[in-house]
Image: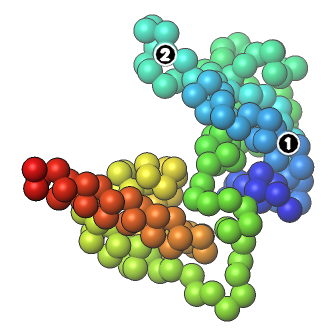
Amino acid sequence: MTYFEDKARLALRKLHADETQYAALAKWAEEHKGQEGEVSGVIVTRDGRIVAETFRVDDGVVGPGDTYVDRDSTDIELGGNRLDLALGAISHALGEPVCHIPIWDLTQGSGDFARAQVVKGRRRMSGAELKKVRHALGFTGPRLAGLLAVRYDTLRKWESDKEPIPYALPDDLRGIVRDQIDALQDLAESLKA
């Protein structure tokens, strides 16, 4: 299983959808990796079928970061293309519930797939341990989330043990600690002069 297949299965699982139908979603995620600033996500049915793409615009007329549905990516006639209105229209037209999956849920996360897999005999970090490390580094939640390339909401769920922390996270944290130590050593050297 690839990184994108794993991310697609997890996204469908969070929506209580059929996670075995992840192939199309994984393919879409792989094709759109690196386009996080342009594309904002996809609208899917409970069986994982992609029915529309969404994107963010900042045109000065609407609020920055508003999400819109790409009319060319769906066969459904939409009265409007704002996400909240489009979800209702698409759900009504299909006669089944649909959900929006943000692109970052499919293309971002700590570490690569191989490192994020369950490792036998390796204990998973607890939320309390993660919070202790964050406090020891003097980081706010949003700052650490940014360094880990995850959403702040994800970090909060990890710290409260509402979502399992990836096995690879301690490796990522060690890298952040090393970067902080290097920065402090550089600062100390510059103060000697």
Task: Indicate left or right for 148 with 15 as reference.
Answer: left
- Residue 184 position, x and y percent, is 24, 59
Q: Which mark is first along the chain, 2 or 1?
A: 1
User: Callout 2, which amino acid?
Assistant: Asp
The numbered mark at residue 58 is 2
What element does badge 1 sit on? helix
Q: Residue at x 61, y 43 (%)?
A: 104
What element does badge 2 sit on? loop
- Residue 82 position, x and y percent, is 60, 21
User: Callout 1, which amino acid?
Assistant: Lys
> In this rendering, is residue 82 above or below 101?
above
**109, 49: nearer the viewer:** 109
Q: Residue at x 41, y 73 (%)?
A: 130
* Residue beneath disc 1: 27
The answer to whether residue 157 shows anywhere in this view is: no
Mark 1 or mark 2, whichever is nearer to me: 1
The answer to whether residue 136 shows anywhere in this view is: yes
Residue 24, located in which quarter of the rendered image?
A: top right
> In this rendering, is residue 62 above or below 101?
above
Q: Residue at x 17, y 58 (%)?
A: 188
Task: Indicate left or right for 145 with 24 as reference.
Answer: left
Crowding near pointer 2: few (<14 within 10 Å), some, many (20+)?
few
